C-alpha cells in the first residue's frame, strides 16, 4: 500500500492500525498526522490547559507504540478509538493535578479558529451573528459543549458520540436535544434560525 496517497478513510486507518500493531513505526506516524489536529481540538473542549492537552496527545501516541503488541488489531474506526482514549487520559490528568475542567474558558475567538464550521459562519454571516453563536455555545454546560463539538464539529454520529462519552445512545440523544434547546434559548430569535440552519442544528 502507498502510505502517501489520497485522503484519510476508515479503510486506510484500519489498515494503518494493523500495520501499527505489527510494529510499523511509519504507520504510527501517519495515524498521528491524520488525527493530531482533531485530537488537540477535542482536548481543548475538555480542559483550558493547553499544555495538558498537548502533553496527553503526545503521551497517547507514545503509549500506543509501547503497547503495540497488546493493542486490539481489528479497530475499524481509529479516530473514534483515539478520541475515547484521549478523553480518559485527560480525565485522569485533571484528577491527578486536582484541576477543574472548565470549557467556558475557551473563548469565542478560540472556538472560531478551531472549527471549519465557524469559518463558514464568518464567511456567510456578519460578525455579530457569528459572535453571538460562539458566545451562546460557550455559556452551555461543559458536557453540552462537548456533545455539540463531537456531534457537529467532529461529525460523529450518536452511536460514536456515546462511545466517546461513555454514555448510552439514548442518553446522548436526550442530552443533545436539551443542549440544542438551551442553545436556541440563548440566541435572539432573529438570528437563531439562520445560524442553527448553517450548522445543521435546526433545519
Image (cartoon, grey):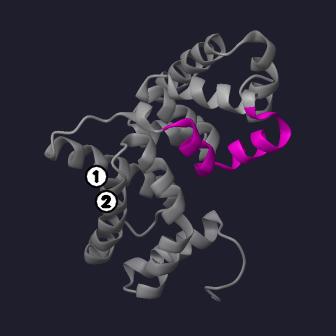
What residue sits 69% from the left and 50% below the top? 116
Quadrant where the N terminus sits is bottom right
Please check the rendered image and state whether residue 15 is part of the magenta-colored stretch, yes or no: no
> Image height check: is 149 above or below 54?
above
Q: Nearer the viewer, residue 132 or 63?
A: 132
Which x, y percent locates residue 104? 43, 31
Q: Secondary structure at mark 1?
A: helix
What residue sits 74% from the left and 26% below the top? 196
On residue 165, the disc is none
What residue sits 31% from the left and 62% below the top? 55
Question: What stretch of residues is rendered in magenta?
Answer: 107-127
Label 1 vs label 2: CA separation?
Answer: 7 Å
Q: Nearer the viewer, mark 1 or mark 2?
A: 2
Choose the circle earlier in sequence order: 1 or 2: 2
Q: Nearer the viewer, residue 88 or 73?
A: 88
Which x, y percent locates residue 76? 53, 61
On residue 89, the disc is 1
Q: Secondary structure at mark 2?
A: helix
Label 1: few (<14), some (14–19) or many (≥20) C-alpha neighbours in 10 Å: some
Q: Nearer the viewer, residue 123 or 96?
A: 123
Please check the rendered image and state whether residue 121 is part of the magenta-colored stretch, yes or no: yes
Majority secondary structure of magenta residues: helix
Left or right placement of residue 174 versus residue 84 in this view:
right
Quadrant where the C terminus sits is top right
Which x, y percent locates residue 143? 43, 29
Residue occupied by mark 2: 56
Q: Are marks 1 and 2 in contact (CB under 8 Å)?
A: yes
Label 2: few (<14), some (14–19) or many (≥20) C-alpha neighbours in 10 Å: many
Amino acid at each position: 500500500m502507498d502510505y502517501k496517497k489520497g485522503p484519510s478513510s476508515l479503510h486506510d486507518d484500519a489498515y494503518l492500525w494493523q500495520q501499527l500493531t505489527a510494529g510499523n513505526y511509519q504507520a504510527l506516524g501517519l495515524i498521528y498526522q491524520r488525527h493530531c489536529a482533531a485530537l488537540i481540538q477535542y482536548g481543548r473542549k475538555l480542559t483550558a490547559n493547553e499544555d495538558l492537552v498537548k502533553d496527553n496527545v503526545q503521551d497517547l501516541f507514545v503509549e500506543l507504540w509501547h503497547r503495540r503488541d497488546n493493542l486490539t488489531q481489528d479497530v475499524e474506526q481509529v479516530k473514534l478509538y483515539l478520541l475515547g482514549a484521549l478523553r480518559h487520559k485527560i480525565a485522569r490528568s485533571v484528577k491527578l493535578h486536582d484541576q477543574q475542567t472548565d470549557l467556558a474558558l475557551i473563548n469565542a475567538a478560540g472556538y472560531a479558529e478551531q472549527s471549519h464550521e465557524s469559518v463558514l459562519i464568518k464567511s456567510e454571516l456578519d460578525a455579530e451573528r457569528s459572535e453571538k453563536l460562539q458566545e451562546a455555545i460557550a455559556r452551555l454546560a461543559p458536557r453540552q459543549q462537548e456533545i455539540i463539538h463531537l456531534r457537529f464539529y467532529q461529525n460523529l454520529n450518536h452511536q460514536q458520540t456515546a462511545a466517546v462519552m461513555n454514555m448510552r445512545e439514548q442518553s446522548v440523544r436526550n442530552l443533545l436535544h436539551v443542549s440544542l434547546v438551551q442553545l436556541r434559548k440563548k440566541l435572539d430569535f432573529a438570528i437563531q434560525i439562520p445560524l442553527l440552519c448553517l450548522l445543521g442544528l435546526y433545519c
